[in-house]
Image (cartoon, helix red, strand yellow):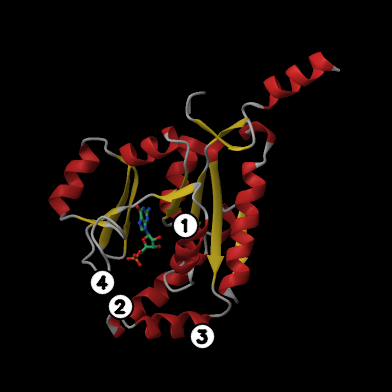
Amino acid sequence: MSEQETHKDQGKIERRGLLLVLSSPSGAGKTTIARHLLESDPGISLSVSVTTRVARPGEVDGVDYRFVDRQQFEAMRLNGELLEWAQVYDNCYGTLRAPVEAMLARGQDVLFDIDWQGAQQLGEKMARDLVRVFILPPSVQVLEERLKRRNQDSLDTVARRMSEAAFQISHWAEYDYVIVNTDVSQSLSSVRSILHAERMKRERQLGLSSFVRSMQKEL
Ligand code: 5GP
């Protein structure tokens, strides 16, 4: 990231933008946490992924995902338009590079609701700016109940997602922070604290050294 791609939301000190990744098995509550965070923090914007998955009831194209067919997805991948991509279940998901770069250039932090494969790829490309958070359900029973209650996927899909959950969870140790989502508001406040502390990191506050230098001149 260049020096220009910074922002000034902490007084006069220019800050380097960060990439906040939230991963979890489906049904652990990550999407709810992400939505509340986005609503309450104007400094962070969602990276809207592209997917070949069919839209669920209530999902809006361009808001929840950009829904594309396989051919369109493949073209984006081959053109190098994707910062990362992965096959999850039977569908492909990917992050478009251009909107992420535009958000960082505007001085926004970027929130990613992506899986461990995406987190790994971002780690290879943008490790310095990456903060990875894994959300765990409080128990297997609660995870299953949440998937059933959501009632947007068929029972067959619920069973498959349960078996996938074990695999997703096996990647927990690749994350910087792990939150057990027993209570959404508590988890949200944990994510906010993480974001706040990560924003305060010395190396992200690009304007600090000139601020301190000018202060030293006056001492
Ligand atoms: P869902 O179909 O339930 O919306 O998402 C399934 C999984 O795909 C979730 O774990 C979600 O985080 C992940 N996912 C969504 N978008 C992306 C993406 O752009 N890249 C990657 N690697 N995973 C994604």
The quadrant where ligand 1 appears is bottom left
Contact, CB < 8 Å: mark 1 with mark 4?
Answer: no
How far, Cα to Cα, is label 3 from label 1?
28 Å
Q: Determine which residue is flagged by label 4.
A: 56
Contact, CB < 8 Å: mark 2 with mark 1?
Answer: no
Residue depicted at 37% across the width and 74% down the height: 161
Q: Determine which residue is flagged by label 1.
A: 38
Compare marks 1 and 4 and give the one earlier in the sequence. 1
Residue depicted at 34% across the width and 76% down the height: 160
How far, Cα to Cα, is label 2 from label 4?
13 Å
Residue depicted at 27% across the width and 38% down the height: 81
Quadrant placement of the C terminus: top right
Residue 146 horizontal side relative to residue 206, left or right? left
Q: For the residues carrying marks 3 and 1, which lies nearer the camera in this image?
A: 1
Rendered location of residue 98, percent (x, y): 31, 37
Compare marks 3 and 1 and give the one earlier in the sequence. 1
Compare marks 3 and 2 and give the one earlier in the sequence. 3
Q: Which mark is residue 141?
A: 3
Which is nearer the eye, 137 or 18? 18
Compare marks 2 and 4 and give the one earlier in the sequence. 4
Q: For the residues carrying marks 1 and 4, which lies nearer the camera in this image?
A: 1
| Quadrant hosting residue 114 | bottom left
Q: Which mark is residue 157?
A: 2
Q: Is residue 165 above or below residue 105?
A: below
* Dot 1 amino acid type: Leu
Q: Secondary structure at mark 1?
A: helix
